[in-house]
Amino acid sequence: MKKTKIIYWIFTVLLIAMMLMSAVTSFMPNPQGEAMMKAIGYPYNVLQLLAVAKILGSIALLVPGFPRVKEWAYAGFAFDLIGAIYAFLMIGTPIANLAFMLVGLVLVFGSYIYYHKLQKEKQAY
């Protein structure tokens, strides 16, 4: 169980750090962010909505209990990253430029998988 817990926390802490970093930068004036959102055809204020959702999802993963809320947080992170990857691919962004988002998706799935492994191990005791 200790190994599973360590792997879970590595994935989860990296995921939360990534989401919070993304959220914080969305609240700062950012010409690059505005240009990026314009390029994919979304209004800039969508970034602030996503930032609030990322902060709430990060809190949900950190607070003990509330398994259904955690499931929604994982789903939200996956939708956010898959949607971003899709939007950028549709405007012709090379896949190499999407590495940050692909790493984020790996972190979401890694954290999710090890969250469920940890829950099964806790039930076994």
Image: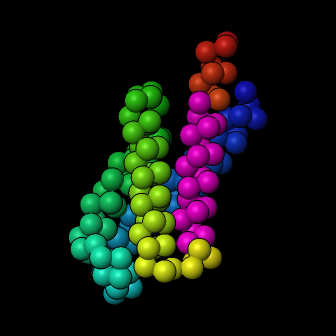
Vertical position of residue 12 compared to residue 36: above or below: above
Q: Quick check: 6 left or right of 75?
A: right
Residue 98 falls in image quadrant: bottom right
Tally the numbered discs.
Answer: 0
Give the quadrant of the N terminus. Answer: top right
Give the quadrant of the C terminus. Answer: top right
Q: Could you tell me which residue is drawn at 47 percent across and 59 percent down?
A: 81
Counting from the top left corner in percent of width and height, residue 20 is at 44, 60
Vertical position of residue 26 compared to residue 82: above or below: below
Counting from the top left corner in percent of width and height, residue 92 is at 48, 80
Residue 30 falls in image quadrant: bottom left
Q: Which residue of the protein is positioned furthest toward the right in this rendering?
A: 3
Q: Quick check: 57 left or right of 9?
A: left
Q: Looking at this view, is 40 or 17 the one in front?
A: 40
Q: Looking at this view, is 46 or 23 the one in front?
A: 46
Residue 15 visible in image: yes
Q: Could you tell me which residue is drawn at 58 percent across and 46 percent down?
A: 109
Counting from the top left corner in percent of width and height, residue 90 is at 44, 73
| Residue 114 highlighted magenta (yes or no) | yes
Counting from the top left corner in percent of width and height, residue 31 is at 34, 87
Q: Quick check: 113 left or right of 89?
A: right
| Residue 90 highlighted magenta (yes or no) | no
Q: Could you tell me which residue is drawn at 24 percent across and 74 percent down?
A: 43
* Magenta portion: prevailing SS class: helix
Q: Quick check: 76 left or right of 120?
A: left
What's drawn in magenta, residue-wise? Answer: 98-116
Q: Could you tell me which residue is drawn at 35 percent across and 82 percent down?
A: 39
Residue 19 visible in image: no
